Image (spheres, grey):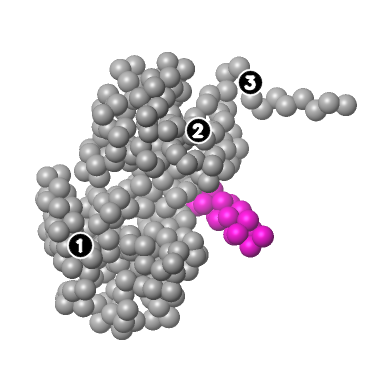
């Protein structure tokens, strides 16, 4: 007898992620898992949108009444011109990855900063009052910089191979936050006095750079009194940076939980509802297990 699929009904809401390419996106698995765990009546899909179709895609989504979208490459900056309003941290980051429907148009948010904050907080580390060393000044670095400032860090040190880029990021951040910020060449990190938290937003440790680390000397972690290391990379699951830090007794975290928690933050925005920390952790653990099973074949 034919099975009747009754999960999607006339009142089922649709959410989506747009980008190009998009077939690799892990977002549908994350959000549809969350719909199941939280017993919400929505489905989440992924839609390929080329750069020259972005304007039409956003107008179409709005006319269809799609209440929320995620935005990924290459649209995170171009989308800024198509929004009714942009939230403060997204303005500071200069990119948007989450849209929420309003009667006047879509409102833009960036949940990468919130996601990284949840990841570190749920791992048991408190950033408030800490000295943060941020490695890298690109998109992820910008988001993590905003996160550290929003979480009340005492000082932010931005270290980048192109020091001018680090200085530009510092200049932009000072428009929004009154916190001590230093911009240095990444080669100069050994000259800093100390840092409590290290955040890696470079590509060292990923792909062809898998066997590299932005911190070459393991003694750095002890000499600078590092307490915690967060690497936004999650493939490989443990980068050389994390292996080295862990070998020195430093608590470490990779970027997979940030991927999950930024999605959780998006749903909190869409549904105007705070998700309990215990449920956040449960969802993250469930998805981590799934990811590792798929990765290991």
The prevailing secondary structure element of the residues shown in magenta is helix
**Residue 258 locus on image (x, y percent):** 42, 53
**Residue 217 locus on image (x, y percent):** 31, 82
Mark 1, secondary structure of its residue: loop
Q: Residue at x 30, y 50 (%)?
A: 139
When the figure is inspected, residue 176 is found, relative to residue 2, above or below; the finding is: below
Quarter of the picture containing the N terminus is top right
Mark 3, secondary structure of its residue: loop
Residue receiving disc 2: 47
Residue receiving disc 3: 9
Q: Quadrant of residue 243?
A: bottom left
Residue receiving disc 1: 162
Mark 3–mark 2 Cα distance, whole angstroms, equals: 21 Å
**Residue 185 locus on image (x, y percent):** 18, 68
When the figure is inspected, residue 6 is found, relative to residue 207, above or below; the finding is: above
In the picture, measured across the screen, residue 181 lies left or right of residue 30, that is left
Magenta range is 281-297
């Amino acid at each position: 007898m034919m099975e009747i699929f009754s999960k999607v009904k006339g009142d089922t809401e649709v959410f989506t992620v747009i980008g190009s390419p998009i077939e690799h996106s892990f977002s549908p698995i994350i959000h549809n898992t969350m719909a199941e765990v939280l017993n919400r009546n929505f489905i989440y899909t992924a839609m390929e949108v080329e750069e020259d179709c972005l304007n039409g895609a956003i107008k179409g989504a709005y006319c269809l009444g799609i209440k929320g979208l995620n935005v990924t490459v290459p649209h995170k900056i171009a989308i800024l011109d198509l929004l009714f309003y942009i939230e403060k941290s997204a303005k500071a980051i200069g990119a948007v990855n989450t849209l929420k429907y309003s009667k006047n148009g879509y409102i833009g948010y960036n949940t990468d900063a919130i996601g990284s904050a949840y990841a570190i907080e749920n791992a048991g580390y408190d950033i408030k009052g800490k000295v943060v060393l941020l490695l890298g000044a690109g998109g992820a670095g910008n988001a993590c910089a905003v996160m550290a400032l929003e979480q009340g860090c005492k000082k932010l040190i931005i270290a980048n191979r192109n020091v001018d880029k680090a200085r530009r990021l510092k200049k932009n951040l000072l428009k929004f936050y009154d916190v001590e910020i230093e911009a240095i060449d990444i080669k100069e990190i050994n000259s800093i006095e100390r840092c409590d938290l290290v955040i890696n937003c470079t590509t060292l440790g990923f792909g062809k750079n898998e066997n590299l680390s932005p911190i070459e000397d393991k003694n750095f972690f002890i000499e600078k009194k590092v307490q915690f290391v967060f690497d936004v990379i999650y493939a490989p699951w443990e980068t050389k940076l994390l292996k080295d830090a862990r070998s020195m007794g430093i608590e470490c975290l990779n970027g997979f939980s940030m991927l999950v928690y930024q999605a959780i933050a998006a749903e909190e925005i869409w549904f105007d509802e705070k998700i309990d920390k215990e449920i956040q952790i449960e969802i993250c653990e469930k998805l981590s297990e799934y990811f590792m099973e798929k990765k290991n074949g």
